[in-house]
Amino acid sequence: MIREFWVKNYLSIRDKQELSFVAKGPSSELVTEVADGVFLYKLGILYGSNASGKSNMLLAMNEVFRLLVLPKTDAAVEIGGCIPFVLTKDEPTEMHVSFYADGTRYDYNVKFNGKHILSEALYYYPNKSKSLFYERSFVGENVQADIKFGASLKLQVKTQESIRENTLNNHSVLSVCRKAALKEDIAPFNTLHAWIMANYHDVDGNVEKGLVEILKDAYSNSKKRKFYIRCFRSRLEHSE
C-alpha cells in the first residue's frame, strides 16, 4: 500500500505536489494496519476544478512504479513517460513514493529526464530501521552508472557487478531482475519486483507503454490519432 507520494515538474505540475495516506489510528473502516502500529487509509479522493491536475497526479503515481519495474534493452530508447512542465522543460522530473510491501516499508526517490535516470535511491525498513537497498547516480552518456548496494542485502561481489553491467542509463536498477538471470542472492530484488508487478495497477493496462506514451504516440501520428478518436467515440456511444 502507498504511504505517501509526491511529484515535481511533471505534465501540468510544476511545483512539488504531495499525497499522504497516513492515518493517526484505526479511526474508521477505511483505515488498515499495514505494519505494527502503522495505519494507512485504503482510499483517497482527489477533488478540484477542471484542469487542476487531478488526473496528472494519478498518471504520475502510475509512472513512478513503471520506472521502478520495467527495464529497457536499448540504451538509446527514451523514457517515454517523461513530460516535464512546459516552462521548466529543461529541468528533470522528480518523484518519490513510500509504500509497504508484505509489511515492509520502502522509500523510492528518482530524478530523470527524457534520456536518463539521473539519480535514484531505494531504502527499506527490514527491522523498522532505515537501510539502504541501493542508490545510483548518472555518470555520463554510454558510461556505467555509479551504483551502491546496502550491506544488509548481503549481495556477492559478482552479483553486484552483474547488476551494474546490466543497468542501462534509461531504466531503474531494480528492473534488471526482469531482464537478466542472476545469482540466488538476488532474492530481495526478485521478491520486491514480483510484489510490485502483482499489486500495482497500470492505469491503461499496457505493460510496454503507459498512458502518457500512448497519447504522445497518437498525437505525433495522424492515423493513430484518428484511430484513437474513433475508439473513444465508439466507447462513449456504447456507454450511453
Image (cartoon, rainbow, N blue to C red):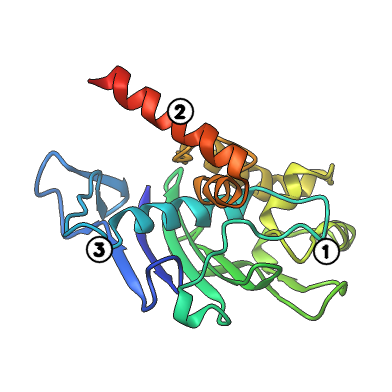
Q: CA distance from mark 2 to mark 1?
A: 43 Å
> On screen, 55 above or below 169?
above
Could you tell me residue 240's position as x and y percent? 22, 20
**Residue 38 found in image quarter:** bottom left
Element at badge 3?
loop
Q: Nearer the viewer, residue 202 or 237?
A: 237
Could you tell me residue 49's position as x and y percent? 16, 59
The residue singled out by tag 3 in the image is 52
> Residue at coordinates 23% horizontally, 45% vertically from top-left?
43
Q: CA distance from mark 2 to mark 3?
A: 26 Å
**Residue 56 found in image quarter:** bottom left
Residue that sits furthest to the left in the current view: 27
Q: Which labelled disc corresponds to residue 231?
A: 2
In screen coordinates, is 128 left or right of 169? left
Could you tell me residue 233's position as x and y percent? 37, 29
The residue singled out by tag 1 in the image is 164
Q: Which three-letter amino acid code belongs to the residue tagged 1?
A: Arg
Q: Which three-letter amino acid code belongs to the residue tagged 2?
A: Cys
| Count of marks placed on residues | 3
Q: Which labelled disc corresponds to residue 34?
A: none
> Residue at coordinates 9% horizontally, 49% vertically from top-left?
27
> On screen, 141 above or below 178?
below
Query: Which numbered disc, 2 or 1, marks the residue that appears first in the sequence?
Result: 1
